[in-house]
Structure formats: structure tokens, C-alpha cells
Amino acid sequence: MNTRYRIGWITLIVLALSLALAASVGAEEVLQAIRVKDEGPLVNPEAGFWMGAKAVQVTMIPQIITIPMNPNAAIKSLGVKAAHNGQWVAILLEWKDSTKSDRIMLDEFGDQVAVELPVQYKKDAPPSPMMGNPGGRVNIWQWRAAFQHDIEHGEPQVRDLYPNVRVDLYPDQVLRAIDARPYMGALGVDNPISRPTHSPVLDQMAEGWGTMTVQPEQNADGKGVWNDGVWRVAITHPMASMTENQPRLQPGDETLIAFAVWDGGNREVGPRKAWSPWVPFKLAK
Amino acid sequence: MAKVFNWQIGREMDYPYEGVRPQRQFGMIMDTNKCIACQTCTVACKTTWTPGRGQEYMFWNNVETKPYGYYPLGWDVRILEKLGVQDMSSFPYKGKTLFESAPGGERLLGYLPDDLDYANPNVGEDDSYGNMPQGAYLQMPHMQWMYYLPRICNHCTYAACLAGCPRMAIYKRQEDGIVLLDQTRCRGYRECVKACPYKKVYFNAMTRVSEKCIGCYPAVENDQQTQCTITCIGKIRLQGFISAPDKVREDNPLDYLVFVKKVAKPLYPQFGLEPHVYYIPPVHVPPAYLYQMFGWGVEEAIATYRKATDDPKLLGALLLFGSTPDIIHHYKVEGGHAVGYDEKGAEMVRVPMSEPIHVRAAYDERYQTYRTNIS
């Protein structure tokens, strides 16, 4: 990278940081989780109680701190609401996206949205909102449109993606399941991105860029609905911490919350995304 | 970016990570003059590693016809076009590598192919360059030409797939230099597919993560050559370990052919990855084309190769191709044989430098007829 580029990027980074700062100062607005009577996981983005929750508009900034990046990330703003029932906390995320991208192929990427909370919230030393930092662990609940599609319509088979494909024989048609495993790629080693899922939301943790790890125990759930160019996604998670890698939340608590969003139609994936700084988050008593 | 030394371009270059060479480096030499594109290697690789769901059009090994064959479509001309015209007039290389041409916000210059680019693995098969005009005649190099280019992952020293992955899910093994993609850590971002200029990382739409050639590491760990090498009916391949340029061993057939005799050349060295599949260039193809594809010294390589019969040590190394499934660590020519040894010096294979010739009488007494073939 030559000097001209370097100076360009430093300028951009400074600009981004000041923007982030400005946004966080501007976002004095607090996300309030209202207390609701509905029981169990609050997975329905169209539940009636959401009418009673106040929306916070969160400005989304293209991720331009680490490489690779997409400075033209498509989604600029997220409408966020929150609720809890004493057992489960839920976040409702709403954003405009004219294309519903829920199919994954080499040149097709899926829409995604993620909610991030510090695992242990220390007011004077919060973890970095950019996926945490070494020692500053964050819990990330990531909803994927492709998983939502799988749950509603079943996982796509080869024939669904390539209607005219012709194949003589697959190893799993002639071998015992255990012997066919080596031919299943990431499915054979239970990669959580590959394996069949019961929830469209991945329960994950991170301590900085490149460290995102899917937790062994999956507790997050949710549902996304796309209608008339708008995604409405509810993400829900138990408030009681089941492992040391999840926040322990109680009614009346104050903590922080941050967001990331990917527009699959704009080929956004991984670090090519839009994100937000921390937003203060309060749970009603 | 760190500064690393790339011997194939003769200078230091930028790379996102510090330059650490493995203890041993997987290497392969392919003699393009002997390849007939029978695709036995392709089928051997396919049935061994990629017959599963989502791997239907995934060929870790493929053989394409040059100049018009590509898998995926246009893989080399597209990245060459993006890289732009570079100065290859002298050595060390004065132009830019893919790492040095990284656009803002990217680790290196690359592109993500379309899914349809993989739909025609045999595109351009046997198409030759240009039409045969009136008055055409056979000359060297040929006026109209084509040749076959077998390809696998190059297990590069400065792998672009590894550099492109933001999760460090791709790693280069210390023990043999094989570049592997961790199937448990990959999240399917496709940054590696975009980054690899040889397009030897593939996306599996069924598992939603990427996969690549594993250099048959279970075989290599047992001192056996790869499936694509040992099944090659034309005996065009030799797989083993190649040394760093300052540690060349003349009795290692790969070192001898690449560093001493310089008859085998890397594929697109100007990209800056230091790839470790080396090609003996086709003797009948115009040097300008070969120069772009295999870099500096192609004409000298062809001249040396054409005189191999006068050079027993060179001929001996070439005769070891396809002679044994074992990796040959040492070799020598003695008593009219090229002899290959394993790492501990045990003899693995003995190949006669020339096949014995039996001459039969021109007239066959038994059938009372003349023979057309007497040797």
C-alpha cells in the first residue's frame, strides 16, 4: 500500500472515529426494554407488545477500520426496540432492504443482523464495540436470513440451487453414514455455519476481530419477516446466564448494546458490514 | 504489510504476514510436453476427495487447454487484466505483485468469479490459437498451437487465500508447507476465493463454506506422492519437497530441475505468491506467451530440456517422473540407471536410462513374411 493510500485511509479512519463519537454522543437516547407479560422466548417480530415499545433509530456506519471493508455498506440506519418478560430479553430490529437475500451460493450472499452485549459490563471500562477486545469479551447474537429460510422451507438441496444438475451417485447413498462423513466437508466436522439449525440466530462470542466463535450451547432464538422492502427481525435470549460467556441480565439492569447489519444484495459478508457504537441499554423493572 | 523475500521475482515484496518458510515445502513438477489431457488426474482427485454434495463442479485438480481453456472461466486473463500491464523486461521483477496492487480497503488485488464461471470445465478444449492459413507449414515454435495445463493448488509460500482470510482459517503447515483451510473455523466469507489468483479455493453451497486442495496430506505424511501424481498415465508429474533457494540439494530431483537446470518454472510468478507447482514449458509454443505465463528464462528452459538426452543427470531426474508412488528425496545416476532413494537413503526405484532394444530379423521365417516393425 503506498503512502497516498495510507494517508487516505488514516484520514478516513479519523473521520469514521469522529463520526462514531458524534453518533454515540448523539445517541444519548437510551434503548429501553419494556416489561411484557407474554411468556417464554419472545420470538415473534409481529407480536402486539412491540407497539408499546419506543423505537430508537441507530445510525449504522460502514466498517472501515479493519481490512477488508466495504465503505459503501448499504444500510444506514436500524430501528431498534427492546422488551423482556423477566426470563427472556428480546430485541426487535427493523431496516429497509429492497432485496430479500436468503440464498447462499458462490456469488449470492445472505442478509444478516447482529446484536452485541458485553459479557461483563464495567461502566468505566466497557469492551470495544468492534467485536470486543482481548479480555473484553462480548456475546453476539446473529440472525441469518438463510437460516430463517432453512427453518421455514427446509435446507436447500443441490437440485434447489442447480435445477438441471445430474449426478450419478453420492457417497452417502452407498456408504454407512460414518464412512460418508469425510465426503461431507464442513458438515462432517459439525461446522456451526453448515449444520442444520433449529434457530435462525447464532449464539456467539468474540474478543476482537477474527475471533468470532459459535458457542457450544445455543440459547438464542428469533424470527425474521421480510415485507414490502422491510426486514423485521426479533432476536431473543434468556436473561439468566447459562455459561460464563453470556451476560447475566436482571430487570432494572443497565448495560450497553451494539448492532451490525449486512445487506446480502450488496455482497456484504464478514467484515464488510455496517455497525454501530455502544448504545445505553436499560431493562425495565 | 511486512517485507518478505520472493526468490521467484528476485526481490522483497509486501505480504500481510511475516515471511516464515516451513521446515519442508510441498512441491510438484509437471512436464506439459507429456500431458495429453486424459483427465485421469482429475478423476483420481475427484473420486478421492470431492464426490460429495455441493462438490459437483469442484475440481481441486483440473486440466485445461491453453490458450482458450479456463477453469473457472477466464481465471488468468481476468486477473492479468486487473493487474494491468507490468514490466517483466528484466529480473528482478520491476512490476507490481497482487499484494502491492491492493486497492484501498483490500488486502490484495483479486476478484470473485460468478457461479456460472465454473459451469464449463472443458471450455476451449483442444482449441488451438489461430486458424491454419493457406501455405502453413510445420515450424518451431508452431504457427498454430495449443497445449494442456494441468493445475492443482500451488501451496504457495505467500498464499493469497491465507492472506485474504480475515479469520485466519487458512494455514500453512510447518511440516510440509501444505496450505489447508480449517473446515471448522471457516464461515464462508469467500474472501479466499476472491483472493486466490489461481482460483483453487472453491465455495461449497451445501456446506456454505469454502474448500481447497489438501495436497493429499495423508499420503504425503506417509511419504507417498499425491493421487494426481501416482495415477498419471503419461508420467508427467513428480511430487516431493522443494528446498529454499539457499538450501538447494543437487541430489533432490525437484531442486535439480528447478534450481540447478532451471527447466521447470512457476505459474505466473509475477503475481508474487511463490507458487510451488513448477512446469516444464511446452517446446512448441511461442516464447512470448510462455514468458507471460511462466516468467523469466522459459527459452533457456526449453533449450536445456531439448538437450536432455545429452545430459545424464538431467535425463535421470526426468525419468523418475511417475516411476514410483513413493516420494523421492535423493537420486543419482549410476550404472545406466536413475536411482531414487527415500529420506533415509533406502533405494525406492531404479529406472533404466534407456530401454533395452531387441532387434528382430526383418524376415519372419515362420510366417514367411517381412516384418514392418523390427525393434
Image (spheres, coloured by chain):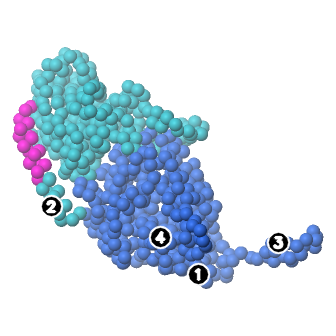
Chain colours: A cyan, B blue
3D distance between C-alphas at marks 2 and 1: 54 Å
**Is label 2 in contact with label 4 (beta carbons under 8 Å)?**
no
Q: Are marks 4 and 3 on the same chain?
A: yes
- The residue indicated by pointer 2 is A7
Quarter assignment of residue B136: bottom right
Nearer to the camera, B239 or A74: A74
What is the x, y in percent for residue B74? 44, 55
Q: Is residue B53 above or below residue B374?
A: above
Q: Which mark is residue B290?
A: 4
Element type at mark 4: helix
3D distance between C-alphas at marks 1 and 4: 19 Å
Amino acid type of the residue tagged 3 in the rendering: Thr
Q: Which residues are magenta?
A: A14-30
Q: Is residue A156 above or below residue A132?
A: above
3D distance between C-alphas at marks 3 and 2: 78 Å
Q: Earlier in the sequence, mark 1 or mark 4?
A: 4
Of tags 1 and 3, the one toward the viewer is 3
Count neighbours of disc 4 (C-alpha within 10 A) and say few if under 14, some if 14 to 19, many if 20 or more: many
Count neighbours of disc 2 (C-alpha within 10 A) and say few if under 14, some if 14 to 19, many if 20 or more: few
Amino acid type of the residue tagged 1 in the rendering: Lys
Q: Earlier in the sequence, mark 1 or mark 3?
A: 1
Amino acid type of the residue tagged 4 in the rendering: Leu
The dominant secondary structure in magenta is helix
3D distance between C-alphas at marks 1 and 3: 30 Å
Who's the residue at 40% across and 39% down the image? A194
